Amino acid sequence: MIRFSNSAVPFAVALWVQLLTTPQVYRRCYECMFVSVYSDAKVHVRHYAVGYIFFTGIQYSILSMTLRSDSSTILRFSDLFRFNVLIGTLIFAAAFHLEHDTTKRFANFRKDATGKVKYLPS
């Protein structure tokens, strides 16, 4: 087994990352269904399956970083107030907002002045 460091990620931090990741997944789903304007094409079910596998894998990989040799999971909320966790949360919040704003702007490129979607001629 490859061990990159002697310390594991605190359980509270891993839980916080999972709580931040969950709205990210739901926001991306909302954007794909209601905001993005690409064409009338439908996404194949295999693409949805890959997405579910990917985001499930993210959750398991986050949880795997909390594993310790003594298998103890202690929930200390003081771990959430570390400098790196606070900075990471601020960066995540800024990126969350920026990504949503960018998606809306890209969708508006495909709309005319009345808000109707302009499709490229085939």
Image: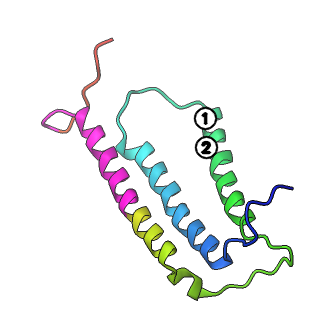
Question: Neighbour class for label 2 at 10 Å: few (<14), some, many (≥20)?
Answer: few
Label 2 amino acid?
A: Gly
Checking the image for residue 47, the label placed there is 1
Q: Residue furthest front?
A: 5
Q: Nearer the viewer, residue 55 or 108?
A: 55
- Residue 84 % position (x, y): 50, 72
Q: Is residue 56 magenta?
A: no
Display colour scheme: rainbow
The majority secondary structure of the magenta stretch comes to helix
Q: Quadrant of the N terminus?
A: bottom right
* Image-quadrant location for residue 69: bottom right
Q: Nearer the viewer, residue 50 or 113?
A: 50
Q: Residue at x 60, y 35 (%)?
A: 47
Note whether 110 is above or below 13 in the view shown.
Answer: above
* Image-quadrant location for residue 92: bottom left
- Residue 89 % position (x, y): 45, 69
Q: Residue at x 78, y 70 (%)?
A: 67
Residue at numbered disc 2: 51
Which range of residues does the magenta coloring cover? 94-114
Q: Nearer the viewer, residue 27 or 42?
A: 27
Label 1 amino acid?
A: His
Question: Neighbour class for label 1 at 10 Å: few (<14), some, many (≥20)?
Answer: few
Q: Residue at x 48, y 78 (%)?
A: 83
CB contact under 8 Å: marks 1 and 2: yes
Q: Quadrant of the C terminus?
A: top left
